[in-house]
Amino acid sequence: MTEVREDPRLDRLVDLVVRLASGDLAARLEPSSARDAVDAVITGINLLADELEEMYQDLEQRVAERTAALDQAHLDLERMALSDSLTGLANRTLLNDRIQQAVARAERGAQPPAVLLLDLDEFKTINDSLGHGAGDAVLVEVARRLTSVIRDTDTVARLGGDEFAILMPDATEEQALRVAQRALRALRLPVTVGDRAVWALASIGLRFGSHSQTAEILLRDADTAMYAAKARGRGNIQVFQPAMHSTALARMQVATELGAGLAAGQLSLHYQPIVELATGEIIGAEALVRWLHPKRGQIIPAEFISVAEDSGLIVKIGHWGLRTAIGQLAAWARQFPLSPGFRLHVNLSPFEVRRPGLSEHIERTLEHHDVSPSRLTLEIAETGLMTGDTNGVETLLRLQALGISIEVDDFGTGHSSISSLRQLAADSVKLDESLIVDIASDPQQRQFVGAVLQLIESVGLGLVVEGVETAAQLDELQALGCRYGQGYYFSPAVTVEVMTHLLLSRAILGNPAGRPGAPGRQGKRPSGRSNGKC
Ligand code: C2E
Ligand code: MG
Ligand code: MG
């Protein structure tokens, strides 16, 4: 037997194969200088190892890419589940989570969190009149402004629709109130959408936390406070008080019953005569809604108009009121000739004015009853006219163009400066009763009212005074040159039957025989022309 001397390269070759097989893809073997068959195998295995290594690296890179994509998708999903897609703010789920964390921290000794709930006051009008694209742009801008007023540790969330929340963990009451005030101020500036300026004012409810409170209770109480802010006339901040709960429940009850009451015919219009002060002659009437509740009896508007505004029912009530008032004008005109300048005044809530379609609705109703627009005056509270809402101003201008008269109601209670009266789309002003309460006993008040009247006259507006209760007030008003007014001194609001009788009998109200009729400086009638219809 011949002994074969083993080639040492074979051992190294076996070793290489073992290393490669065990995953060491960088292992290689240098071929020898012999360049024989064994070297050829070594070179072949080296080439195979190169290829294997390349394939492996490629595979590794693809795995890394897929893993990164999966991680991103996971993050996106998480963000989508926790944030609002329109504004990028936290959503309700994330807010709840953060409130819970803040509550837990308060258990360990930190300040309890404060929660602020914020609802835009007339967002629906923006959506209805300018479209959803504009509505979205407003929401994004509101989100931006709210984010600019908070501290790094606070969270702004959008809870849905036009409802936002701010969580202030570990905040003192002063800090929380300051943030709420800053938020309110930030929203007072108009938002420009296309070529329009709109206002996204908000009502804010604030709940200071106390220990061991759940996120749910904090949010619920902030919501209750927010509704209290809305009821207070909007655009203000209310801090939660436990008594607000019962008020909120009562308002909900009123809203439910009012809707049913309207459908069941429990609402009616009463009419308060408007007279020429010097003669006591009736020159118009104000239609005032009354609700005859089956259990509570007659309810005055102060108890349900703001509920109707909050619940949106005011639009139905407003349509009903206009139909009824215009129908009544037509009914009177059928029964007897109305005096040429007689006008019926109907109150409108600012909400109705800002909703699209109001002027068309009124025009159709007037046509249906064949009543002249010059018979109608629409009273809108001063505060309702001053919001700068362009849609509302256009509606008023259209109504004026039809021949309907626009009157600024409760003048002297809002924030409008007299100079801004010139910019209002109005024909006349109704001076609020609060301005004349002390007119007979307080010379300063008399002087003040005198100055106000002069300014109203100087901008060319007509004038009616409301709340005339005494002969002494009447004398002062006449001496100041007022010509038209209404109030208990002449007549309270009366039923349609009584009003019909007053008109039919051409009643003289008050006691003009006993008074000198002072010549009027306020010469302009609060109403305009008549075109010969009823
Ligand atoms: P307003 O338009 O300023 O109406 C005048 C209110 O003063 C009426 O109260 C009237 O009854 C009352 N009043 C009349 N004479 C006197 C007086 O000599 N002294 C005093 N202190 N008050 C007098 P009312 O009927 O309770 O209406 C309250 C408010 O409710 C109205 O204020 C108006 O803003 C609103 N309102 C009434 N009817 C309607 C309606 O049909 N639609 C809308 N949107 N609002 C209405
Ligand atoms: Mg009125
Ligand atoms: Mg008034």
Image: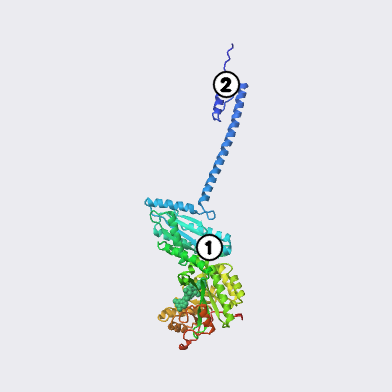
Q: Position of residue 468 (x, y in %)?
A: 46, 80
Judging by the rendered image, the residue that carries numbered circle 2 is 10
Circle on res. 403: none
- Other-residue count near label 1 (Cα within 10 Å), few / some / many at <14 / 14–19 / ≥20: many
Residue 473 appears in the picture as rendered: yes
Name the one closer to the observer, 452 or 237.
Answer: 237
Judging by the rendered image, the residue that carries numbered circle 1 is 123
Q: Residue furthest front?
A: 294
Q: Position of residue 328 (x, y in %)?
A: 56, 77
Q: Position of residue 408 (x, y in %)?
A: 51, 74
Looking at the image, residue 467 lies above or below residue 10: below
Callout 1 secondary element: helix
- Marks 1,2: beta carbons within 8 A: no
Q: Is mark 2 within 8 Å of ligand 1?
A: no
Q: Residue furthest left?
A: 109
Name the one closer to the observer, 263 or 120.
Answer: 263
Q: In the figure, is residue 96 to the left or right of 393?
A: left
Q: Residue furthest top?
A: 1
Q: Position of residue 411 (x, y in %)?
A: 48, 75
Q: Amino acid at mark 1?
A: Phe
Q: Amino acid at mark 2?
A: Leu
Residue 462 appears in the picture as rendered: no
What residue is shown at x 48% (from left), y 56% (from top)?
A: 147
Callout 2 secondary element: helix
Q: Earlier in the sequence, mark 1 or mark 2?
A: 2
Residue 128, by quadrant, is bottom right
Q: Nearer the viewer, mark 1 or mark 2?
A: 1
